[in-house]
Amino acid sequence: MNILLTSAGRRGYLVEYFKKALEGIGEVHVGNSTPVSPSFYYADHAVVTPLIYDEAYIPFLLDYCKKNHIDAVLSLFDVDLYMLAQHREEFAKEGIKVIVSAPEVIRICNDKWETYQFCRKNGFLTPKTWLHLSDVKAALEAGEISYPVIIKPRWGMGSIAIYQAENAEELEVLTKKVTREIFRSYLRYESAFDEEECVLFQEMIHGQEHGLDVIHDLDGAWQLTVVREKIAMRSGETDCARVLSDERIASVGTAVGKALGHIGNLDMDVFVTEDAVYVLELNARFGGGYPFSHLAGVNLPKAIIKWLSGEALTDELVVKKTGLYAQKDIRMIDITSCVKEDGK
């Protein structure tokens, strides 16, 4: 069995997890739009792909999968998820399983305004959110909320262009700054769908941020919810965390997953106060917090391989080290062999 991880980037640890899960029965292929990708170092095979929005992207992936006998494709990047979700039937016709949620699920997760609407519709607590500067100003004047106000991209990831406005002057200036930064980054692709409404304004919740892995099988049935208290963040990812046993928080994640109906992992961010759990963001993929769950004994890559093979699970989706306290490390790797002499 061969697996292709697309938009693999710096997720070398996930390549290692899948290689171990496939040991003796298959290989891990990775793809990214640039060879300057640490994941290439860890993979059995690597390929430079067209950009996600290039019209050649899907045909390229299909051709690569057929030539290399790929059994399943799994993406590690939000923008890529929606593209693959729209074309998963084309892969299925070739006997290739794309492990991705339905397009409408990906849309809810990628679009933070849709996330807000989903939470309100299904009765989940979430920070009050507005699409227009005039609306948040009116809410401030009416005393519905108070400063600080969070300003962030509607289609955001990696903590790009997220700011905190402390007063009216900052609200004006930072709104313009967020817009500029959106269109100077890769966020511009999804934001181009609605340039007039690509910035969100959100009330600030004072609580402890937690991350959850809400795991479903390949048919969308709930299997496990893992709770992590976030101790430190770096570049939008969990850098240090503690794995907890907290049914109050876990039950919210489980309920969200069942209402959403995603496939595989849902990386979920919540704020926890003394008396409430607020849903902040949803990402229908492996997130930067998954390694903490893995280190605590959960093995989703192995579970995925077993599901694809039709095998029953044993203890792959069990938290064996509740209370685990862990932090990510920084290490250097030599990617010379992955990059051509001209640097491309």
Image (cartoon, rainbow, N blue to C red):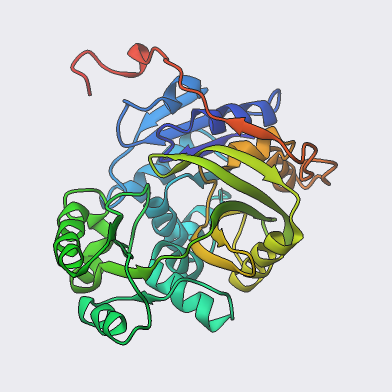
Q: Quadrant of residue 49?
A: top left
Residue found at x 44% / y 54%: 81
Q: Give me the residue at 77% from left, 36% from top.
A: 321
Q: Position of residue 182 (x, y in %)?
A: 22, 55
Figure check: 195 above or below 230: below
- Quadrant of the drawing holding the C terminus: top left
Is 95 in front, or is 217?
A: 217
Determine whether, in the image, residue 81 is placed left or right of residue 151: right
Left or right: where 136 falls relative to 108: left
Q: Looking at the image, which is closer to me, 100 or 93?
A: 100
| Picture residue at 50% right of the left edge, 22% below the top | 42
Q: Is residue 221 visible?
A: no
Q: Quadrant of residue 70?
A: top right
Quadrant where the N terminus sits is top right
Against 240, is 260 above or below? below
> Could you say where residue 223 lies in the image, as x and y percent from the top left?
75, 56
Viewer-side residue, 199 vs 17: 199
Against 19, is 289 above or below?
below
Residue 226, given in percent of the width and then of the height, sits at 69, 50
- The answer to whether 77 appears left or right of 95 in the picture is left
Residue, far bottom: 142
